[in-house]
């Protein structure tokens, strides 16, 4: 390795590290393995649930890595040890799940300790989870529970379908929750002080380096804090335009379908 400009590589998954088929490509796998051999820490920070991500990372030969999941509500090591946890309060989670919305154009989801729950059957979501086979259970959220809620999220046909939900939740809960978008069509709600950035800060706190030794990659509004707080944040060429507008100071790289993160890492670290 020609140089070691960063101690840790931090990456989002969908739209970033994963390719256009929502899987991790061979070129990316080889790149991460080469970096890990050179003692560069690999940290994945995603809106996905741990059970989903663990299968994806299982394709990469790594001895050590950290999986920050549900936008920072949980973090685990590769051995499955829980490193941090921050759930929505039970009653608040239940109320958020029952937020009024246009059921023709929006459907509700929750990630909880006992699974992924959804308001209607959506088989087309399977394409995002082909590596892991991780799938949902259909429930009536009016008769569900709020225990161990990592996040509640609403998926709409268009961003406009989600705007009334966002406005309602901000008016009702204010700073007691953290609201973000993983894609323009996916509104996500976590407990206050939950984000990829806060989880990352906690993960590296016990190490001999901090956020200033990290390079990070992302494509969504849920990456904004993480990309802004590390030493170098990189935005994907296929990113949410709102992220590009919010962080004009950050470098924009290639497309996830071309495995641009891997190419950028090889150039940065001198790995070939």
Image (cartoon, grey):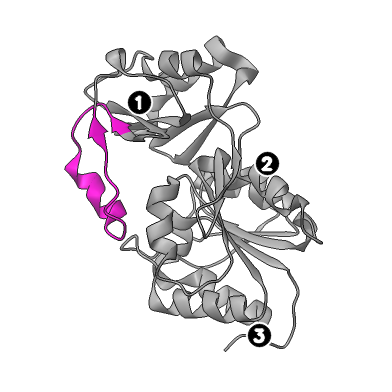
Magenta highlight range: 117-138
Expressed as whole percent of the image width and height from the top left, the position of residue 83 reads 61, 46
What residue sits right under mark 2 in the picture?
198
Expressed as whole percent of the image width and height from the top left, the position of residue 40 reads 66, 72
Expressed as whole percent of the image width and height from the top left, the position of residue 32 reads 54, 74
Of the image marks 3 and 2, the number of the one nearer the N terminus: 2
What residue sits right under mark 1 in the picture?
161
Picture mark count:
3
What residue sits right under mark 3 in the picture?
270
- Residue 228's place in the image compared with 257, above or below, is above
Residue 60 shows in this picture: yes
**Closer mark to the observer between disc 3 and disc 2:** 2
Give the CA distance from mark 2 to mark 1. 29 Å
SS for callout 1: helix
SS for callout 2: helix
Of residue 184 and residue 148, the one placed in the foreground of this image is 148
Give the CA distance from mark 1 to mark 3. 45 Å
Give the CA distance from mark 3 to mark 2. 30 Å
Residue 20: assigned label:
none
């Amino acid at each position: 390795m020609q140089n070691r400009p960063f101690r840790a590589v931090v990456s989002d998954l969908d739209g970033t590290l994963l390719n256009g088929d929502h899987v991790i490509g061979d070129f990316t796998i080889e790149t991460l393995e080469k970096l890990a051999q050179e003692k560069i820490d690999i940290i994945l920070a995603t809106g996905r649930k741990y059970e989903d991500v663990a299968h994806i990372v299982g394709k990469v030969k790594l001895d050590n890595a950290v999986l920050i999941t549900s936008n920072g509500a949980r973090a685990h090591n590769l051995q499955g040890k829980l490193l941090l946890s921050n759930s929505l309060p039970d009653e608040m989670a239940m109320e958020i799940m029952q937020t009024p919305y246009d059921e023709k154009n929006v459907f509700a989801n929750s990630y909880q300790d006992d699974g992924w729950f959804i308001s209607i059957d959506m088989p087309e979501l399977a394409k995002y989870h082909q590596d892991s086979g991780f799938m949902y259970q259909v429930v009536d959220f009016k008769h569900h529970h709020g225990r161990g809620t990592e996040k509640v999220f609403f998926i709409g046909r268009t961003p406009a379908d989600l705007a009334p939900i966002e406005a309602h939740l901000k008016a009702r809960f204010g700073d007691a929750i953290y609201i973000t978008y993983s894609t323009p069509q996916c509104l996500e709600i976590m407990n206050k002080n939950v984000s990829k950035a806060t989880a990352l800060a906690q993960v590296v706190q016990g190490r001999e380096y901090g956020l200033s030794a990290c390079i990070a990659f992302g494509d969504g509004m849920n990456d904004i804090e993480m990309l802004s707080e590390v030493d170098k944040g990189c935005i994907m060429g296929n990113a949410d335009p709102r992220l590009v507008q919010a962080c004009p100071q950050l470098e924009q790289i290639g497309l996830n379908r071309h495995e641009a993160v891997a190419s950028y890492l090889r150039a940065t670290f001198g790995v070939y």
